[in-house]
Amino acid sequence: MGMSGFRLDDEQRLDWLQLLRSEGIGPRTFRTLIGRYGTAAAVLKALPELGRRRGRPIRMASRGEAEREMAQASRFGVRFVAPSEPDYPLTLRAIDTAPPLIGLRGDAALFARPMVSIVGSRNASAAGLKFTQRLARELGEAGFVVVSGLARGIDTSAHNASLATGTVAVLAGGHDRLYPAENAPLLDEIVARGVVVSEMPMGWEPRGRDFPRRNRIVSGLSLGVVVVEAARRSGSLITARFALEQGREVFAVPGSPLDLRAEGTNDLIREGATLCASAEDVVRGLAPLVAKAPAGDFGLMDATRERADEDPLWDELDLDALDGDPPRLEGEAPRATAERPEAGSYAASFDGGETARDDMGRVIGLLGATPVSVDDLVRASGLPIRSVQLVLFELELAGKLVRHGGNAVSLA
């Protein structure tokens, strides 16, 4: 069966939604359980036994809750799409934490075109907004769809400038809970001329952890991410981190050393991001990936990794602690994966990949209070420079790294 050869019927879609809205079910857990039990309906029947194994019940979404959300989504013009279905973006499908269902409004045909994200400061400068408008307009004219998070500042400017050529807005809350509310007119225009994406339930008010979740979709949809303005510890740098982990290209617009809004982007350039002074820099940098785009295979999973030291974006069930033979349904014998169309199609919707080595531990072990050059770190660790840069970037975001002259670093 091909990667996009399996469509959910109405009952299966409700099963998937009900499972996804149940306690402890995130993208990785969903994927594992479907592979283990074959169908979402079978997983739902097994959840009570899994709850018994862990010592307390798992709160399951009810069928009625799933039906009400489906009806509410339909009233808003939202349709839920699974990774095995044609309207699900190939680029997003490739990431390790691809949402099992995304809610879409608008023209999903835009996903067939190459996409690039533009993100940056909510408190953007006038110069930053002007540059973003020009960049988004020229990238659109070059054939790219512009992706952003519909936040104030740079995001809003990027969406406005690319309405005519194609734009994708990714929401941190439900489709009916826009943040910020002031962008409601812009959202309506994007629905009419572009596409709006959310993985969150209808009625969901966005909270702090939901914005990084959104950011990994923003980068996951795109071949590359352009950061226009970002202070240190900015949410835009989280998007850049996800982009690195997903194997995307990262571009950064340089700024004045005196402007706090440029500290993050200037740091990205020092760490190896491609300097972006015009749309041509992005077009040239993404040309090799655009050439591969029709096949949907960008080697993107090669750089994807699960890190134990990250704050989790989902409170997922600990399946390792629940390991054992899956509970069988009444009178049912175990079935092979080939006989389970949901499991086979869902697994085929993703590229495989093993958990990467503990790069973070290796690099931290080589760091101390004495500054050491990044080149020396790369040589001593034996890791690719991209992996070392990613670790240093994460340490810096966490406030655990100090940068010195001569491209040297030390632990804070």
Image (tube, rainbow, N blue to C red):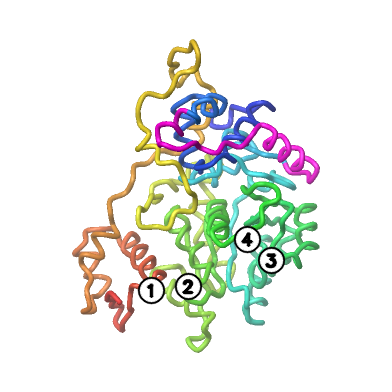
Label 2 or label 3, whichever lies nearer to me, is 2
Assess disc 1: are there few (<14), some (14-19) or many (≥20) residues with their C-alpha within 10 Å of its C-alpha. Answer: few
Estimate the spatial distance between the alpha carbons at disc 4 and disc 1, rounded to whole Å: 26 Å
* Disc sitting over residue 137 in the figure: 3
Estimate the spatial distance between the alpha carbons at disc 4 and disc 3, rounded to whole Å: 14 Å
Name the foreground residue: 176 vs 52.
52
Label 4 or label 1, whichever lies nearer to me, is 1
Q: What element carries label 4?
A: strand
Q: Is residue 209 left or right of residue 336?
A: right
Q: What residue type is labelled 4?
A: Ser
Name the foreground residue: 343 vs 319.
319
Of label 1 and label 3, which has the lower sequence position?
A: 3
Q: Residue furthest left?
A: 380
Residue designated by label 4: 148
Q: Residue furthest top?
A: 331
* Disc sitting over residue 399 in the figure: 1
The span picked out in magenta is 49-78
Label 4 or label 2, whichever lies nearer to me, is 2
In the rendered structure, are the residues bearing label 1 and label 2 in contact, judged by CB atoms less than 8 Å apart? yes
Of label 4 and label 3, which has the lower sequence position?
A: 3
